[in-house]
Amino acid sequence: MLHFGELTVSNLPTLYFGTDCPSCHSSYICVFSYGEKQPGATVLHISGVWKFEKME
């Protein structure tokens, strides 16, 4: 997981990861936030998953 820096989703740190599908060999990136919104209330908010092509 890598941190997106100053960007936030739902006032939580925004994280992302990329992965390659082993069956179709497509590349995807997932952007999400994860953290404690209130004491004892942890939130996961998925902004989206996008398919992308790598540039050479």
Image (cartoon, rainbow, N blue to C red):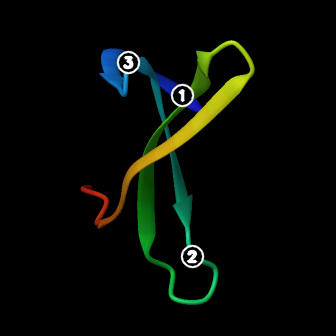
Task: Give the secondary structure at mark 2.
Answer: loop
CA separation in Å, label 3 and label 1 = 17 Å
Q: Is residue 14 above or below residue 46?
A: above
Side of 2 where 31 appears, left or right: left
- Residue at 55%, 67% (x, y): give it: 20
Q: The C terminus lies in which quarter of the figure?
A: bottom left
Between residue 51 and residue 32, name the one nearer to us.
Answer: 32
Q: Amino acid at mark 1?
A: Leu
Q: Amino acid at mark 3?
A: Asn
- Residue at 59%, 34% (x, y): give it: 43
Task: Give the secondary structure at mark 1.
Answer: strand
Residue at the limit of the structure toward the left, as seen here? 55
CA separation in Å, label 2 and label 1 = 19 Å
Q: Which residue is mark 2?
A: 21
Q: Is residue 32 above or below residue 51?
A: above
Res. 29 image quadrant = bottom left
- Which of marks 1 and 2 precedes in the sequence? 1
Between residue 10 and residue 51, name the one nearer to us.
Answer: 10
Between residue 27 and residue 10, name the one nearer to us.
Answer: 10
Residue 40 percent coordinates (x, y): 75, 20
**Circle nearer the viewer, 3 or 2:** 3
Q: Which residue is mark 3?
A: 11
Q: The N terminus lies in which quarter of the figure?
A: top right
Q: Which residue is mark 1?
A: 2
Q: Amino acid at mark 2?
A: Cys
Residue 15 percent coordinates (x, y): 49, 31
Residue 5 percent coordinates (x, y): 38, 13
Q: Please tell me how crowded label 2 is: few (under 14), some (14-19), or many (20+) other residues with Cα within 10 Å.
A: few
Side of 51 where 35 appears, left or right: right
Q: Please tell me how crowded label 1 is: few (under 14), some (14-19), or many (20+) other residues with Cα within 10 Å.
A: few
